[in-house]
Amino acid sequence: MTSGWAADLLLGCTVLLGASVQRLAGIGFALVAAPVLVLLLGPAQGVVLSNCAAGAISAVGLAGSWRQVRLTAMLPLVGAAACTVPAGSWVATRLPEPTLLAGLGALVSGAVLLVMSGARVPALRGVRGAFAAGAVSGFMNSSAGVGGPAVSLYAVNAGWTTREFVPNAQFYGVLVNAFSIAAKGVPRLTGPAWLLVAAGITAGAVVGKALADRVPERRARRTVLLLALAGGLTTLGKGLWGL
């Protein structure tokens, strides 16, 4: 749990950065923020806070774009994720902290590298691909807080444009994070920490929306992925050091 104003302030800044990224790109909160939140709060509390904040910022973005959601395409993703979230939660509560840190770092780093490569995976096409991506995403979201990359890879292989992807990713983010929170509960934070988290989400939504009109998509995406890779490798290193 966070202790002291400096740690709470760092927590709020991390949420602000992650929320800005999520509002800008549709995904990315957990990739950028989860490794830092885990280092600040520990694996269990850091992941569930990532779920709470990512779900909240997804809901903010979805409020203005829900009409663009492809429900028929999203139902297999959401249904498969709902089935694997409990398994991810079970794993997260039973592994020792160094193992969880190493696993989270490896998952984030590997997911970022796959997304950066623009990997084309025939198994991630069609309804079967949606079920596969949703199942992997649900497990990763509940256990490590990083469900977005699997959905992003599905979208790449389905040929979705960024404009199509963002509202659907926000819709998915609201539901899969709600499933994860239902399985694990809410994080235990102090009152000031909760206030800073709420302020970070609010400010991040404003900043992300403003940046969306000014920052070229390719540059923004590359910056997000590089930040996420740095965080993933740092978390992996700390986990391996503790083993």
Image (cartoon, rainbow, N blue to C red):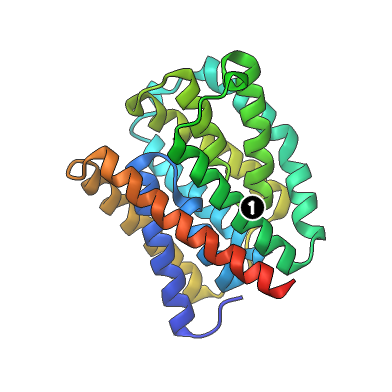
* Residue 195 versus residue 185 in the image, above or below: below
Q: In the figure, is residue 186 to the left or right of 40?
A: right
Q: Secondary structure at mark 1?
A: helix
Quadrant assignment for the N terminus: bottom right
Q: Is residue 239 visible?
A: yes
Residue 154 spot, x, y in % from top left? 53, 26
User: Which residue ends up furthest to the left in the rendered image?
Assistant: 214
Q: Nearer the viewer, residue 55 or 98?
A: 98
- Residue occupying image coordinates x 56% and y 51%: 108
Indicate left or right for 170 with 209 as reference.
Answer: right
Tell me which corner region of the image, top left, top right, bottom left or bottom right, holds residue 99.
bottom right
Residue under circle 1?
A: 144
The correct choice, above or below, for 7 with respect to 236 in the image is below
17 with respect to 125 (left or right): left
Residue closest to the eye, 112 or 196: 112
- Up the image or down, 108 lies above or below 149; here it is below
